[in-house]
Image (cartoon, rainbow, N blue to C red):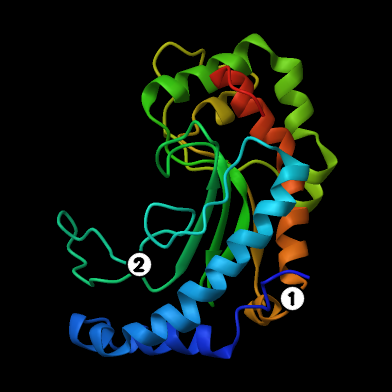
Amino acid sequence: MGYFKGFNKEFWAFFAELKENNNREWFADNKPRYQDHVVAPCMDFIVDMGERLKDISPHYTAIPKANGGSMFRIYRDARFSKDKRPYKENAGIQFRHKLGKDAHAPGFYLNLQKDRLFYGGGIWQPESKTLGEIRDRICYYPKKWQAVIENEDIINVFGGVSGDGLTRPPRGYDGDHKYIEDLKRKSFFAMKQETDYKKTMKVDFLDEVANTFDAASSLLAFICDAKGIEF
């Protein structure tokens, strides 16, 4: 029997109220609620997903820590932003590759937000060396990339590979290349959008996310091969 019981109504109520009171005073008064109703179920989810990940790939980590673990901090870095809200109005969980040091490593991700709920896998805005390695692998092994984008799970579960791209071809790559739209990407994701947040309130949401992570495996394996690391 696992620990995760669902992200219940108290979890979602906290973020609804935070959205209306995104300031340090309110958060300080409600920090016990944050610990009990947000951090605690996230830790339970991370622990239980750690067991599921072993069957998907043994090289991705599930670390049940609110700071320095699989859960993203709630504090926003607003130093260089016009948006000075101090707190994120969502919970984020990433199970990154064991060799990855930050959010830009290949990994599986869950974003918990009522109107922006999604989960899947990929790599977000990697540094230029990694991005070049992925692009080069697409060029050197076009059949392997074709197998990823034609993978039934990638198509049926996610609607294909996604990720923001450049407006022009990256320097050094043929603008007429068969996969130029993929080569222009700055991120590579297979992400499932979910419109009904109430699904997260059930125990079997864990299985739903685990199955979705597994469906993204072909993309993650391609990215790991490009990096020369094990999937």
Do the CB atoms of the residues marked 2 and 1 lie less than 8 Å apart? Answer: no
Q: Is residue 158 visible?
A: no
Q: Quick one: label 1, few (<14), some, or many (20+) residues within 10 Å?
A: some
Quadrant the C terminus occupies: top right
Q: Which type of secondary structure does the marked residue at label 1 adopt?
A: loop
- Residue at x 65%, y 35% (from the top left corner): 220
Q: Can you identify the residue that label 1 sits on?
A: 203
Q: Please name whichever residue, 151 or 71, is drawn nearer the observer in this view of the structure.
A: 71
Q: Is residue 223 above or below residue 202?
A: above
Q: Which corner quadrant of the image does residue 143 belong to? A: top right
Which numbered circle lies on residue 10? none
- Residue at x 28%, y 88% (from the top left corner): 21
Say which amino acid is labelled 2: Ile
- Residue at x 66%, y 26% (from the top left corner): 222
Q: Quick one: label 2, few (<14), some, or many (20+) residues within 10 Å?
A: some
Task: Answer left or right for 45 relative to 143.
Answer: left
- Residue 130: x, y in percent? 45, 23
Q: Is residue 10 above or below residue 82?
A: below
- Residue 105: x, y in percent? 47, 37
- Residue 224: x, y in percent? 60, 26
Q: Which type of secondary structure does the marked residue at label 2 adopt?
A: loop
